[in-house]
Amino acid sequence: MDQGEFSLSEREFSRIKARVYAVAGISLSDAKRTLVVSRLSKIVRTLGLSSFDAYVDHLERGASAADGQAFVNALTTNLTRFYREDHHFEHLRGYVAQLVASQPRGQRLRIWSAGCSTGQEPYTIGMDLLAAIPELRRWDFRILATDIDTAVIAKAAGGVYPGSELNGLSPERAEPFEKLADGTVRVPAAVRDLVSFKPLNLIGTPWPMKGPFDAIFCRNVAIYFDKPTQGALFGRLGSLLAPRAFLYIGHSENVGTGGDALRLVGKTIYQAREPGNKRAAA
């Protein structure tokens, strides 16, 4: 055991798994035991508690909202990058270009990045679409970006990243970023202004947004849920899509039992079946 960490009994691990499943829908495997110890030990010590058992007792018996959120934040995983799974953005460009070509100027376009982590996904959506479809600047175009982890939401809203985030991007894709004196880069203001970051627990009810959305990205989020939770989530997401709008999911995910209102049209790309909700503002 590393200095500063507590031992974790089977009973304590079971209680932690049950707790994070109940509040966030996250299904922790036994392989996550070391991660749990490393991420929660500092919190337990900071609270002045003597064990993980005492910590779960604290969470279950009236912990503050901040303490409850810190527990969830510690056990979420945030792996993302700009232009991850590029085929999704290529497909979205084609779809939105068709919408813009077929609609009068100034129409509404609403996209949701669900499980947005530190913001690379929604910012990629905004940068890519504005670069490819300049007419969107005359549309009512907004991106909703949500995540259960309040810490990553706060970071994402600033739009500032290490310069290394641009590694692997083409010069054309890297060019719009503002290069700051300390070596970091910032998403351009025109793109930051498109995105609204909000905390949201995807297994919570009800969701505040009513849709419908023209596209929803929920990628590499459901892999942390069990099958029933995955099916319920994708079913709810599908219900918020506009007619023939698209849901983009992670490379190792499928909609399972949530696919009644969706049809697979490409690699991890699903389209809302007809009939559906009418296109309107989110």
Image (cartoon, rainbow, N blue to C red):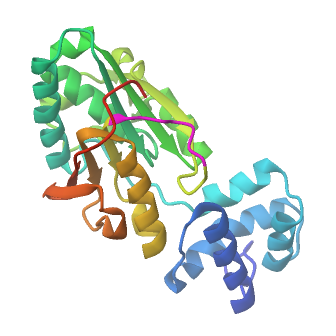
Q: Is residue 9 left or right of residue 136?
A: right
Front residue of 183 and 185: 185
Residue at image location 46% in from the left, 42% down from the top: 118
Residue at image location 43% in from the left, 44% down from the top: 116
Question: Farthest residue toward the bottom?
Answer: 10
Residue 215 spot, x, y in % from top left: 29, 39
Q: Is residue 206 left or right of residue 82?
A: right
Picture layout, residue 42 above or below residue 187: below
- The total of numbered circles placed on residues is 0
Q: In which quarter of the image is residue 164?
A: top left
Residue at image location 85% in from the left, 57% down from the top: 63
Q: Quadrant of residue 278?
A: top left
Residue 178 spot, x, y in % from top left: 33, 20
Residue 269 spot, x, y in % from top left: 20, 53
Picture layout, residue 105 above or below residue 236: above
Q: Quadrant of residue 8?
A: bottom right
Question: Farthest residue toward the front?
Answer: 275
Residue 161 spot, x, y in % from top left: 41, 35
Q: Is residue 207 magenta?
A: yes
Residue at image location 27% in from the left, 15% down from the top: 107
Front residue of 86 and 96: 96
Front residue of 214 and 150: 214
Picture layout, residue 282 above or below residue 204: above
- Can residue 106 be seen by looking at this rendering? yes
- Can residue 175 be seen by looking at this rendering? no
For the C terminus, the image quarter is top left
Q: How would you classify the magenta stretch by its main secondary structure? A: loop
Segment colored magenta: 206-213
